Amino acid sequence: MEPILQLKNLSVSFDTQDGEVEAVRDVNLSLQKGEILALVGESGCGKTVLTQSVLKLLPKTSRIKNGQIIVDGEDITNAKEKRMRNLRGSVMSMVFQDPMTTLNPTIPIGKQITEAVLKHHKVSKEEAKRRAVEMLSLVGIDDPVYRFSLQPHFFSGGMRQRCVLAIALASNPDILFADEPTTALDVTVQAKIIDLLLDIRDKTEISIVFISHDLGVVARIADRVAVMYAGKIVEIGTAEEIFYDPRHPYTWGLLAALPSHTKEGDTLRSIQGMPPVMLNPPPGDAFAVRNDYALAIDYEEMPPMFPITATHYAATWLLDERAPQVKPPILPKRGADI
């Protein structure tokens, strides 16, 4: 089956006063219909830039250096703004981290959803309103007919995020980009939003790209996981492969930092050092200076993606047949809570 989204050797840069910042570097990625793909990594690793480059939501200082973006068989790498306006909402939608930066505080929720429907479908206002009420019900808003007329300040944080999701789904898109949609919510509401996304995926077969730095949340929702570092995908595989058989030292570090791996009274583990400044990316593996298992070649040459299984790949020289055998740190046992 042909992927609904394909990124081929995609590189995205920003022109700044100090020079060119390489935010996304040579990324190859695909998304199947009905699949939930999670992008994980530290802040600044390129997750949001990667997704916003697909939607063409980046500032004018950005540019696609090379590569292709293919959506549902169409190459949109150089698509004009008029074409992108048609694609946004009808084919691709995005949910951002803070719902109050998405919602207009002065306009009733129902009207905001109705506008999204009318923008992409030639329907009457009554039909658009019916669709908006249907969307509010789909995302779990009780008494949607009554709440249709309420402004955002009448809703809690979790309910606002549900309303934003209703707007994103109003035009029945094929792909949903969810950029850390649960970060600003408490744990209980986070769980409800995750369950809601899973339920919507099952009902609509929508494909979801879920951006997060919370591996516990990712473990609950993702079919596949792509680990990003310094603008590159350094490991990708099914959720089970990434969580229970990781091969890249950066993935080991992320998993070791989980609270579930820390005994009561101990200090949380962390990955020492800082990500590189992407004005001048290092010549070899960008993670080498923070990698306790780095080899000499890591400082000289960027590792290729080594295949582990048909679905699991990692960019680390430790997978080269000439590399020494390295035992990873303590990792989650299969079936254990993440």
Image: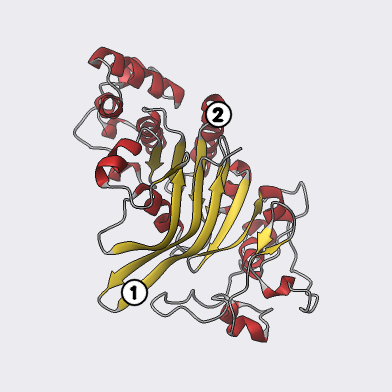
Q: Nearer the viewer, mark 2 or mark 1?
A: 1
Query: Which quadrant: the N terminus?
Result: top right
Crowd around label 2: few <14 · some 14–19 · many ≥20 (10 Å): some
Q: Which residue is mark 1?
A: 20
> Is residue 8 found left or right of 308 in the rendered image?
left
Lower sequence index among marks 2 and 1: 1
User: Could you say whether the residue bearing mark 1 is in a helix, strand or loop?
Assistant: strand
* 265 relative to 85, above or below: below
Q: What kind of colouring is applied to the model shown? A: secondary structure
Res 297 → quadrant? bottom right
State the CA–CA distance, disc 2 to disc 1: 42 Å
Which residue is at 62% across, 47% downward? 224
Residue type at tag 1: Glu
Q: Which residue is mark 2?
A: 199
**What is the tally of numbered marks visible in this picture?**
2
> Is residue 76 found left or right of 271 in the rendered image?
left
Percent position (x, y) of residue 138?
Answer: 45, 23
